[in-house]
Amino acid sequence: MKIGIALRLNQGKLYINKSYIDYFYSLGYSLEYIDINTNLNDYDIFILPGGYDINPCYYKEQNVHCNNIDRYNDILDFKIIEYAYINNKKLLGICRGMQSINVYFNGSLKQDMLNHMNNNHFIEFNDKLILVNSFHHQSIKALSIYLENISKSIDGEIEIIKYKKIIGVQFHPELMKTPIIDKFILDFINEA
């Protein structure tokens, strides 16, 4: 099974945070890097990691609060989402990755919100309250009609979404080590 993770472009350099590599290795998987020129046919599962903001022009808004937007990251995310969707491949979006999924399917984002940047909070998941991290200042405003909301924070923000073989989480599981979330991600990866 080959898992590809999208590289992020920042100030002219492509990178991926080591925490993603370490996390998936701890789950028993290695990751390969994907850039704009990568042949996506080689991969079984895709990961869209966190990163800077998505250009609000993609959800028909003017930029009021978005930071460090870069067309490269938007194009790469949408290319991967489209490939996964058309070819029925698994895709996991983390933080910005989840937001990209919502925008690709015609949802919109809150450009700036309160109380979620560097502020851990609880989500409701599988009839339990789970403490998750939070490093985002944006979140889903209008959920795409194609996506299912399967978890919210206790203050009502959408935290986990799903559509067929595509899931997104607003938090960063690679920085948490929470058994119920790790199992959720492992079950997703291993599901036939």
Image (tube, rainbow, N blue to C red):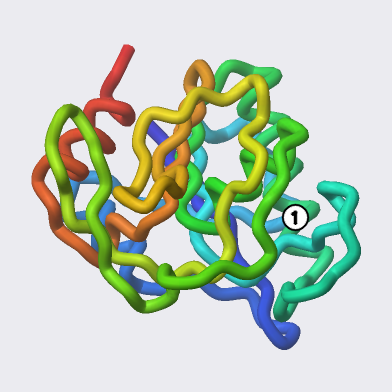
Q: On the rendered image, what quadrant is the C terminus found in? A: top left
Vertical relation: 108 (above or below) 8: above
Q: Nearer the viewer, residue 127 or 180?
A: 127
**Going by the image, does 186 lie left or right of 61?**
left
The residue type indicated by label 1 comes to Ile
**Going by the image, does 27 lie left or right of 146?**
left
Task: Locate residue 188: give its quadrant.
Answer: top left
Number of numbered labels in the structure image: 1
The residue lying at 46 percent from left, 43 percent from top is 158
**Residue 62 visible, this orientation:** yes
Q: x%, y% of residue 120?
A: 27, 68
Task: Locate residue 79: give its quadrant.
Answer: top right
Please name the residue that numbered disc 1 is placed on.
36
Q: x%, y% of residue 61?
A: 87, 56
Q: x%, y% of residue 126?
A: 19, 28
Task: Locate residue 191: give its quadrant.
Answer: top left
The secondary element bearing badge 1 is classed as loop
Q: x%, y% of residue 9?
A: 68, 73
**Going by the image, does 134 lie left or right of 177?**
right
The residue lying at 74 percent from left, 84 percent from top is 12
